[in-house]
Image (tube, rainbow, N blue to C red):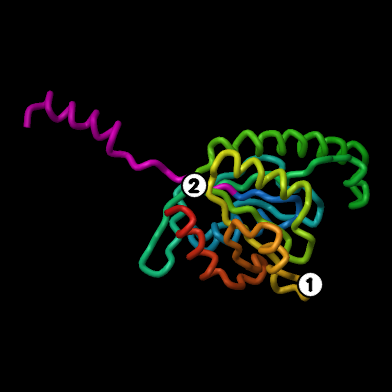
């Protein structure tokens, strides 16, 4: 093969031969367990966590990503970039953080960063190939935040899987999530305890196929 032909083939492969990397985003309200789920996925398949978690709202205030995560479910596998986003909120008040014994300066800084994080997370919706919307299964799912997230995803025609987290708790109810959003598949997990992760990974593979 001539050098010229080889060079042409290399260029053509670089254009047409690379498979698009799927971007899997994790969205949801604050403290639903988005980063806990991202950490569970990352630890299960890469052996390391993605981000830090806290009882204080808006612990995740910037987009966080792990590239080339390969999830296996039976004989099927899916490789994607895992993207954890800041918790979505319709209102962020620094006084909310004072309840967690943060001083005023730190609370105001956190509120500013959290607001910027929400704006960035919404912008990233345009880059997502599929999205996990994480909800606290112990709380009412029919909220303005969840409606806003799902409405934005529906407008963009992004495939969605609803994830009811914290199913290990007594007040958890997947039925409420299913009743609120019957148009979507729902899977229940406990990111903390690793409950029902096999079904969760099967659902992710189905979502992106």
Horizontal side of residue 109 vs 162, given as left or right: right
Who is closer to the viewer here, 166 or 58?
166
9 is within the stretch colored magenta: yes
Residue 191 x %, y %: 64, 65
User: Is the N terminus in the top left, top right, bottom left or bottom right quadrant?
Assistant: top left
Which quarter of the figure is the C terminus placed in? bottom left
Residue in view at x 69 percent, y 50 percent: 28
- Residue underneath mark 2: 81
Disc on the earlier residue, 1 or 2: 2
Secondary structure at badge 1 equals: loop
Kindly identify the residue that appears in the image at 80 percent across and 50 percent down: 57
Q: Which residues are magenta?
A: 1-25
Q: Residues within 10 Å of mark 2 (few under 14, many from 20)?
A: some
Q: Is residue 164 above or below residue 19?
A: below
Query: How many C-alpha atoms fall within 10 Å of the one at disc 1: few (<14), some, or many (≥20)?
Result: few
The quarter of the displayed image where residue 40 is located: bottom right
Residue most extreme to the bottom: 170
Q: Residue furthest left?
A: 1
Query: Would you say 166 lies left or right of 37 here?
Result: right
Q: Residue at x 65, y 39 (%)?
A: 121
Q: Which residue is mark 1?
A: 171
């Amino acid at each position: 093969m001539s050098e010229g032909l080889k060079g042409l083939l290399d260029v053509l492969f670089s254009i047409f031969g690379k498979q698009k990397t799927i971007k899997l985003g994790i969205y949801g309200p604050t403290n639903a367990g988005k980063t806990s789920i991202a950490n569970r996925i990352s630890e299960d398949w890469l052996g390391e966590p993605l981000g830090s978690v806290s009882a204080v709202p808006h612990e995740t205030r910037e987009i966080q990503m792990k590239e080339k995560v390969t999830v296996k479910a039976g004989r099927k596998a899916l490789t994607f970039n895992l993207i954890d986003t800041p918790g979505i909120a319709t209102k962020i008040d620094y006084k909310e953080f004072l309840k967690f014994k943060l001083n005023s300066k730190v609370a105001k800084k956190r509120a500013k960063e959290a607001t910027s994080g929400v704006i960035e997370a919404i912008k990233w919706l345009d880059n997502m190939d599929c999205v996990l919307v994480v909800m606290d299964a112990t709380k009412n799912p029919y909220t303005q935040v969840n409606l806003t997230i799902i409405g934005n995803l529906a407008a963009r025609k992004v495939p969605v899987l609803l994830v009811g987290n914290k199913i290990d708790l007594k007040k958890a109810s997947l039925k409420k999530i299913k009743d609120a959003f019957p148009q979507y598949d729902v899977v229940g997990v406990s990111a903390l305890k690793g409950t029902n992760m096999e079904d969760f990974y099967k659902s992710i593979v189905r979502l992106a196929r």
